Amino acid sequence: MLENFLNGKKWPDVGDDKDTQAHCFVKVPALVARYAGSPLLPTAVDAAVRAQQNNQESVDAAMLFASILEKVVLGYSIKEAIEWATSPGALPAHMQDVVKDALLLR
């Protein structure tokens, strides 16, 4: 990211296109607190993540976390939010697969 910035790149191109570490998750709680229940949440998550990690894998991970956390903030139990995340059509299939794989590790 720093190298991109020093080379004159601006948002979103300044974000590292190979960085898929957990940085994307740090931004989610504040964004959900601000945008829960709003159609602006996905756009806010995308913009915040791409500022540092300009790649779809990081955006998808953050969006998955934001989607589940949003349900909890809006009144779902954690169990209900996870059930929602694995229900048909709730999330894109590749995101649902991540949730299902994580549940297998319990």
Image (spheres, rainbow, N blue to C red):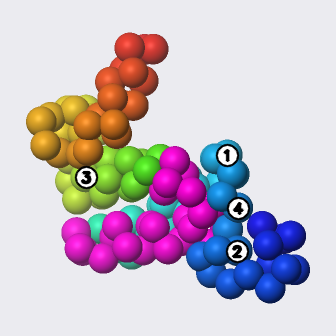
Residue 87 is left or right of residue 23, and the answer is: left
Q: The residue tagged with tag 2: helix, strand or loop? A: loop
Q: State which tag comes first along the sequence, 3 or 2.
A: 2
**Tag in front: 2 or 1:** 2
Residue behind mark 1:
21
3 and 2 marks in contact (CB < 8 Å): no
The mark total stands at 4
Identify which residue, 103 or 56, lies in the foreground.
56
- Which residue bears the numbered disc 3? 71
Pointer 2 residue: 14
Residue 58 belongs to the span the image colors magenta:
yes
Say if residue 72 shows up in the picture.
no
In the displayed orientation, state which residue is furthest to the left. Answer: 88
The residue tagged 4 is 16
Q: Which residues are magenta?
A: 37-59
Q: CA distance from mark 3 to mark 2?
A: 31 Å
Lower sequence index among marks 1 and 4: 4
